Image: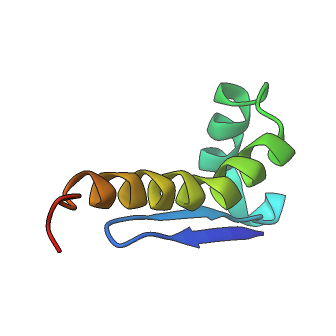
């Protein structure tokens, strides 16, 4: 449903049919039932933009403003 690949990790939101998910799916549902799918999808979509912004800011810090 959502995928965001970074250089060192990947975030994926997948949907697995109930009959295929079995016991693991039931455990995850019980543990994370309060989390909305829209919230998770938004986090995955926007996660990379925060990292790219942070990377761009850190690159600017190393530029010598007095060097021509």
Can you tell which quarter of the image residue 26 is in? top right
Q: Residue at x 79, y 41 (%)?
A: 39
Q: Is residue 5 left or right of residue 39?
A: left
Height in image: 15 above or below 47? below
Q: Residue at x 29, y 61 (%)?
A: 59
Q: Quadrant of the C terminus?
A: bottom left
Height in image: 21 above or below 39? below
**Residue 56 % position (x, y):** 41, 61
Q: Residue at x 72, y 46 (%)?
A: 40
**Residue 32 % position (x, y):** 69, 30
Q: Residue at x 46, y 55 (%)?
A: 51
Q: Is residue 31 left or right of residue 51?
A: right
Q: Is residue 18 left or right of residue 13?
A: right
Which residue is more in the foreground, 12 or 23?
Answer: 12
Height in image: 29 above or below 12? above
**Residue 66 % position (x, y):** 17, 59
Which residue is more in the foreground, 29 or 55?
Answer: 55
Can you tell which quarter of the image residue 60 is in? bottom left
Which residue is more in the foreground, 13 or 65?
Answer: 65
């Amino acid at each position: 449903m959502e995928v965001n690949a970074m250089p060192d990790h990947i975030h994926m939101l997948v949907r697995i049919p109930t009959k295929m998910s079995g016991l693991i799916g039931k455990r995850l549902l019980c543990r994370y039932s309060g989390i909305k799918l829209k919230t998770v999808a938004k986090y995955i979509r926007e996660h990379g933009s925060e990292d790219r912004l942070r990377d761009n800011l850190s690159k600017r810090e190393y530029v010598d403003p007095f060097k021509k």
